[in-house]
Amino acid sequence: MDQIVWQDKYKIDVDFIDEEHKKLFSTMNRLLKISQDEEKSEWGCREGVKYLKNHTIEHFEHEEGYMRSIDYSDYEIHKRLHDNFRFKTLPALEEELVNTDYSIESIRHFLGVCIGWVIAHTQTEDLAISGKSTTKWIDIPHEEEKNALEQTIVQLFNDIFHMKPKMISELYAGEYFGGVVCCRFIYRSQDKEKWEITLVYEDKLLLKIINDILDSQHSRVDDMVINVIRYLSRQFLEQVRESIPTIDLFELEKESLMTYEQLSDSFERSKPSCSMLFDAGEGYFAFCISSSDSIQGRISSSITPDNVLTAVSDYLKKENTDQKKKILIVDDSDFMRKRIIQLLSDSYELVEAGSSISALKIITTAPPDLVLMDYEMPVCDGRQTLEMMRSDQDTAKIPVIFLTGKGDRESVSKVMSLKPEGYLLKTMPDQDIKQNIHDFFAKSKTAEQ
């Protein structure tokens, strides 16, 4: 994510609100650019975050004033969404920034959450002001009910997973916060009413939970991880039922696994009655309740004792297929980076760095699946960068393919003496470079299998 651009589709046709939304987009876009400038990053982002926060709060006040002036029927719900973001989500994100000294990872996390929230809110609740859509939220629990559920979830998370989560949003609307596993359960109440409950675990949180419980070293979500968390989730919900009898989970009717796309679709199709997002310290967790089967017929099959092996296997295959591999492109030439980005953007998630120092920061905070690195760079060249990567056990196994402009025997010998996964000549045709990258990942997948 390198920029966020205002588009006409975000308009709600209330002129001053559209102008303020456009200003929010512009501010976030400037913050994205500042975060990529090493010299300006920390100071610039501190000031930018402060400006964004102040403008957001001011915008909320103006928008609430407008809703009151037109006697907007869902004013209270809309204001609760604003209050939740300004009094819970923003302070939690600011605390993370301070605790990490405004690291690149925390800045991009801050911006990712803000961008996701602003776009989702603009496209749903704000459009509802002008009658272009209906509000997503109905039957939001009273404050006492919400507090009781929040305290129960925090206590159970502590009892079962030995973590102390903090709620950062009481109105989570499916905003993207990274790779996730979604466990979905359909219950019947004693009065035959349906309850849909979805527990959403960020991948890194899930791996932390499983590795602590099993004393293992799982580095990716596999069938063992999925099956353990399925039954932990069931036990979690059993405890919720005992603690809060008003959530009448009488009989489990269906169980399934959802991809993020299906989770997002469920929020579009059904209005949740309660949806909370928690920061567990090791990653995010969401607890979502709806009084209907929000994606009925959109999941190929529910999990049953007869099909569990196939269902879990199919889910993992779909997750692995849908998830793009991440490539870090390291080159001091803007032209070369743009050439590679244009070439590979359809097939991969791409991150770029203009120097080895920037590359090492990215590699340590958000490891890519492959590094495409220029061999001839000033200050710290490809050889030195790879040597530093190999000397750290956390980055030693990240594959590197060198980009080089020299194809003579002596130059190639220097490159290959470092034992990278390979090298590509910059003079190669674009399609040959692209095919080499495809071939690398195909061979890696075969080796894993």
Image (tube, grey):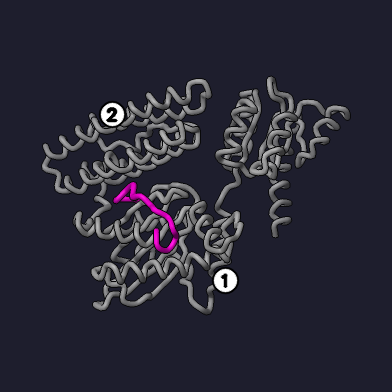
Farthest right residue in view: 409
Q: Position of residue 61 (x, y in %)?
A: 20, 34
Q: Amino acid at mark 1?
A: Thr
Does residue 161 show up magenta in the picture? yes
What residue is pinned by disc 1? Answer: 310
Examine the structure image and report whether residue 330 is included in the region drawn in magenta: no
Mark 2 secondary-structure assignment: helix
Q: Amino acid at mark 2?
A: Asn
Q: Which residues are magenta?
A: 158-174
Q: Residue at x 57, y 71 (%)?
A: 310
Is residue 21 toward the left or the right of residue 29 in the image? left
Q: Quadrant of residue 405?
A: top right
Name the residue carrying label 2. 54
For the residue labelled by badge 1, is the local secondary structure a helix, a strand or a loop?
helix
Q: In the image, which disc is placed on residue 320?
A: none
343 in relation to 213, above or below: above
Q: Position of residue 21 (x, y in %)?
A: 30, 32
**Residue 364 visible, this orientation:** yes
Q: Residues within 10 Å of mark 1 (few under 14, many from 20)?
A: few
